[in-house]
Amino acid sequence: MHLDQLPNETLLQILHSLSTIEDVLSVSLTSHRLHALLSRPAVSSSVSPIVTSANSIAPSQQRLPILFDAADRQIGPLSCAIALVTHNASQPPHIPRPQPPYSLSLLKQILSVGAIANEWADLYPSIHWGGPDPEECASRRLLRLEERYRVRRACYRIWLYDLAFHNASFPRFSRLHPPVIRSRAALLRAWPNRELGELLDMQSIFRTVLEKHVCPSNGTVIRRHKDRYGEHSNPIISLMHTPTPGGMKHWRHLCNDRIGLVDSWEGWGDDVSHYYVIEDMMKLHPGHLMQLYHFVTGKTEELHAVADDGFMMTMSLAGHKGAIEAFVAGLGEWFDNNGETRSETVRFVVSERGGEIGSIEDIVAD
């Protein structure tokens, strides 16, 4: 039977069962009736029914429920994503907010954070099973759908925690104040121990990305340089301080012509100082961390940060370290020497329940 001969209820059921918003938009273009079901405006709407892309969709009685159903399967859980994008300082994060009405603006916001959460789900296998142990590498696999769901849920919840408690309102001296501890714990008490373990699991992924890619220690830089070029290789040359009149392009030209291969990466200190750098950087939310990962792996050439006064800054310095330092400096003075509090808050909540942190880590590992 041809699609055009099916009743509207069947066609709507087909659209509601699709897995991604891209699928919904593509299927809607295969039939005039499917197109009409999605583009027919509501009675009270004065917007013309035009379908061009996910960013320009006219309101319709059926479109938003269909798109949100697809979004739930693509980037769900939507409840966590919506809690994240609707968070503001007017209400504590642990108090549930009323469900906002479906709108294109809300859909675009949750798709933005959902895309980043899915990137972390894509990256998870290579980081989690990316150690030097051959057996660990042999165990690497793609995540199942339910595992990707849990990774996204952990990303949304960590992101919400960071927006609520890793900001200028919570400087270093306030982290041990009992009222502050209780406010942080109130958010985590709503989640069972297994889901708290998922937060710790994602934190280990973030820490590995920071230690191996974004902020490697001096020892890591030297070891990688020797592994790549051997014991008698050219020295590591920093591109951070290059008083070459011709600028960075001229400096790289000189490097290639006169001294051969060089390693332009710069370490972030010895083991002790590097530990405190990582503790500070762990306050960055998943969106910032993914932006830094894209920057150091060459997917983007610029970093963007919003300063405390709301001013947008763009960094594209010669060296990775200088650009990252400028990016962090743009977040405000509160960021320095002020480690993350997620781990200690999870431990606090688990201890309140009479459990041990090792038990929930074992549950997640299984």
Image (spheres, rainbow, N blue to C red):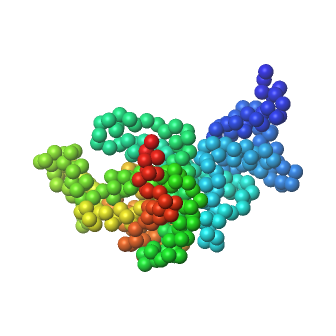
What residue occupies the far left of the structure in this picture? 232
- Say which quadrant the N terminus sits in: top right
Q: Residue drawn 48% across and 77% down? A: 177
From this view, report whether residue 301 is shown above or below residue 17.
Answer: below
Q: Position of residue 108 (x, y in %)?
A: 64, 53
- Location of residue 67 (image quadrant): top right
From this view, report whether residue 63 is shown above or below residue 190.
Answer: above
Q: Residue drawn 43% across and 45% down? A: 365
Q: Position of residue 42 (x, y in %)?
A: 84, 49
Q: Is residue 236 visible?
A: yes
- Location of residue 182 (image quadrant): bottom right
Q: Residue drawn 55% across and 41% down? A: 146
Q: Is residue 291 visible?
A: no
- Location of residue 289 (image quadrant): bottom left
Q: Residue drawn 41% across and 62% down? A: 282
The foreground one among 310 and 7 is: 7
Q: How many marks?
A: 0
Q: Position of residue 63 (x, y in %)?
A: 75, 45
The foreground one among 315 and 63 is: 63
- Locate residue 212 relative to residue 61 in the image: left or right: left
Q: Position of residue 255 (x, y in %)?
A: 21, 53
- Say which quadrant the C terminus sits in: top left
- Locate residue 350 relative to residue 10 in the image: left or right: left
